[in-house]
């Protein structure tokens, strides 16, 4: 782990931060010293100082008092995070990397407020490609942000600063934005996880737009578990945001055991042999994970990607800077200005024609995706030096976006994942792409991917910290508001004959655990396949803990599943050994006279094994 002074606490994932505060070894008041923040670091536009920390500590104290001092109710208590400087933080200046555009934010952006309400502390505003227009990290008057591994290379953008401070472990996570790859590209180039949610899952209220109809707030983190944990806190419908959406709760929470990933039939790497070789290695790792790799014609995806900067959507970017451009065009970075000025070439009729073309391509993409659970693409096709990017800023930037630009157009969610190091010392990454609201399924596979990589000879490191990846904890305490936790006790257990009724509805296994010591288990006299009955004992009767599995199911499929449960079984409330209450199978007592008491076996699997 990198160190500057012995008080610095760098390179730690969220569980270590949480544990430090629980044990009292960390104190929020020491954050400025702990993080070693520096004003001359080009990743920061404005880092945290003691005055800004004091103001946040006052709010944190109020939050702690509101939960009666219970740190478990503030899951991000005292944890620092960085905010891309096109996202508002109350009392801080928002510049979008353009000083003349800057203003003091009077309110937190919705995502910032939700994170601060959970106890998090803003560690600073980060540098970016101006107005989030770029994938290189070089288009800012505040300086070029170098790659965290080899400083002569680009960091990727536009969320360059957020990626840099996360990769170096200064903060455990950061907010970026992602319209055309601005969160995924810098994640891939700095060995990070880049979560680009379904459009509207995280509110864009309080975000300086790039293309408002396509914008997403993204999360950069050291692990998938951390990124999804933060997203669960920050997500949610915001009626004040016209582009916020309600999760229908219908998407699967996991991919099938035999997953099918589509890949480009003829992937483009623009002559970067290292990138090509590394991607082939990633496909081999996926195959080892029992993923079927299906080559696809990528033409409609690439054609849709061309629409973003080659079509009238450039006019949407121009609306953001129009007032500044009319007043003082030289205040805009020359490359950014050259891009947005192309808006004058498009008419209203062009906009409609382009939308018709987008719809046609969307239909083609839907056909290509039939029978495919997700796409697996290189996060970036090639790595470029800063010198190369400055010499040819438009062409190289376009190359970086061939696997990212189409995603929001196609209403897909995305998860950029580290995939280890290239032989030249640069990190590489893959990105998984799936239809809207499949975010949880991507995260579940992403955790499996990290574990698979950690078992490779070279292992898996967290960003550029030098710290090794550790397998995530089971998310037993992190249910979603769009799902139902269900405990199963018999024929629906993994490997049992009715488990398909869960997996076919996109349910995901959460954990194996026990009920509270207040149940008895019976083998019912009739039924195919054989089934147990779980009965809660009356007060004063002898009960026991029974082995169960907890599954998480999309709420839209729960009613259909419940309708399939035959008498004398039903679904009710079940108490687990740790006091949690979940939905679970219960049994009507009238059948127990003919049933066999098998409580002593401790569970249905043990009983079947004994038979």
Image (spheres, rainbow, N blue to C red):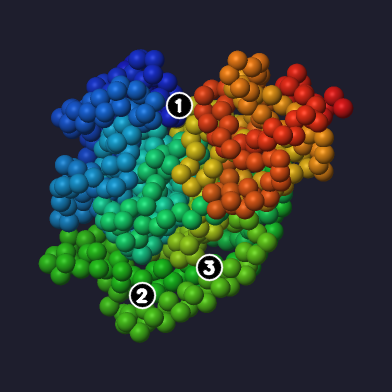
Looking at the rendered image, the disc whose residue lies closer to the viewer, 3 or 1, is 1
- Whether tag 3 and tag 1 are in contact, CB under 8 A, the answer is no
Residue at (65, 35) in percent of width and height: 586
Going from N to C along the chain, the mark reached first, 2 or 1, is 1
Circle 2 is placed at which residue position? 312
Q: Position of residue 419 (x, y in %)?
A: 57, 42
Going from N to C along the chain, the mark reached first, 3 or 1, is 1
Q: Identify the element where label 3 is drawn.
A: helix
Distance of label 2 from label 1 (alpha carbons): 45 Å
Residue 410: give its label. Answer: none
Mark 1 residue crowding within 10 angstroms, few (<14) / some (14–19) / many (20+): some
Q: Position of residue 205 (x, y in %)?
A: 28, 54
Q: Is residue 207 above or below residue 73?
A: below
Q: Position of residue 285 (x, y in %)?
A: 67, 43
Query: Does 116 sit left or right of 597 as displayed?
Result: left
Q: Position of residue 198 (x, y in %)?
A: 46, 55
Q: Identify the element where label 2 is drawn.
A: loop
Residue 302: give its label. Answer: 3
Q: Quadrant of residue 377?
A: bottom right
Residue at (27, 72) in percent of width and height: 341
Q: Identify the element where label 1 is drawn.
A: helix
Residue at (24, 59) in percent of width and height: 333
Q: Could you say which is closer to the camera, residue 201 or residue 163?
A: 201
């Amino acid at each position: 782990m990198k160190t500057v002074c012995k008080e610095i606490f760098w390179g730690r994932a969220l569980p270590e931060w949480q544990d430090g505060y629980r044990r009292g070894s960390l104190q929020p008041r020491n954050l400025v010293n702990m993080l070693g923040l520096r004003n001359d670091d080009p990743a920061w536009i404005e880092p945290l100082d003691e005055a800004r920390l004091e103001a946040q500590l006052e709010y944190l104290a109020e939050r702690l008092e509101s939960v009666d001092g219970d740190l478990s109710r503030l899951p991000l208590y005292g944890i620092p995070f960085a905010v891309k400087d096109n996202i508002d933080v109350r009392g801080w200046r928002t510049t979008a990397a353009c000083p003349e555009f800057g203003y003091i934010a009077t309110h937190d952006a919705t995502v910032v407020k939700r994170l601060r309400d959970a106890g998090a502390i803003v560690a600073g505003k980060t540098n970016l490609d101006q107005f989030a227009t770029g994938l290189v990290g070089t288009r800012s008057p505040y300086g070029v942000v170098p790659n965290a591994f080899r400083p002569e290379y680009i960091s990727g953008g536009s969320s360059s600063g957020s990626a840099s401070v996360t990769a170096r472990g200064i903060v455990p996570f950061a907010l970026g934005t992602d319209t055309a790859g601005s969160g995924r590209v810098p994640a891939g180039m700095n060995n990070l996880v880049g979560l680009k949610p379904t459009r509207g899952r995280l509110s864009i209220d309080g975000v300086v737009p790039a293309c408002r109809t396509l914008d997403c707030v993204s999360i950069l983190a050291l692990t998938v578990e951390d990124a999804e944990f933060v997203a669960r806190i920050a997500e949610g419908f915001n009626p004040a945001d016209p582009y916020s959406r309600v999760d229908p709760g219908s998407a699967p929470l996991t991919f099938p055991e035999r997953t099918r990933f589509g890949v480009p039939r003829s992937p483009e790497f623009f002559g970067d042999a290292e990138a090509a070789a590394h991607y082939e290695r990633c496909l081999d790792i996926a195959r080892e994970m029992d993923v079927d790799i299906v080559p696809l014609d990528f033409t409609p995806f690439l054609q849709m990607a061309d629409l973003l900067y080659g079509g009238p959507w450039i006019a949407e970017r121009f609306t953001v800077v129009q007032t500044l451009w009319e007043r003082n065009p030289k205040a805009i970075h020359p490359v950014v200005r050259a891009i947005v000025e192309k808006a004058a070439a498009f008419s209203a009729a062009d906009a409609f024609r382009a939308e018709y073309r987008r719809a046609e391509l969307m239909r083609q993409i839907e056909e290509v995706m039939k029978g495919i659970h997700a796409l697996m693409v290189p996060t970036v096709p090639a790595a470029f030096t800063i010198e190369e990017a400055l010499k040819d800023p438009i062409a190289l930037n376009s190359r970086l976006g061939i696997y990212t630009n189409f995603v929001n157009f196609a209403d897909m969610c995305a998860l950029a994942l580290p995939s280890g190091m290239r032989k030249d010392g640069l990190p590489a990454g893959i990105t998984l792409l799936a239809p809207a609201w499949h975010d949880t399924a991507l995260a579940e596979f992403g955790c499996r991917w990290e574990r698979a990589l950690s078992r490779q000879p070279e292992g898996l490191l967290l960003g550029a910290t030098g710290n090794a990846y550790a397998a995530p904890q089971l998310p037993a305490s992190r249910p979603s508001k769009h799902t139902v936790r269900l405990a199963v006790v018999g024929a629906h257990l993994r490997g049992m004959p009715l488990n398909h009724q869960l997996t076919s509805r996109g349910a995901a296994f959460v954990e194996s655990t026990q009920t509270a010591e207040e149940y008895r288990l019976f083998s019912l006299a009739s039924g195919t396949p054989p089934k147990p009955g779980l009965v809660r004992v009356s007060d004063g009767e002898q009960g026991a803990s029974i082995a169960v599995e907890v599954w998480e199911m999309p709420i839209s499929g729960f009613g259909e599943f419940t309708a399939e449960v035959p008498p004398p079984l039903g679904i009710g409330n079940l108490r687990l050994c740790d006091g949690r209450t979940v939905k679970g199978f219960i049994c009507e007592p009238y059948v127990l006279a003919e049933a066999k008491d098998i409580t002593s076996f401790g569970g249905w699997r043990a009983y079947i094994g004994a038979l």
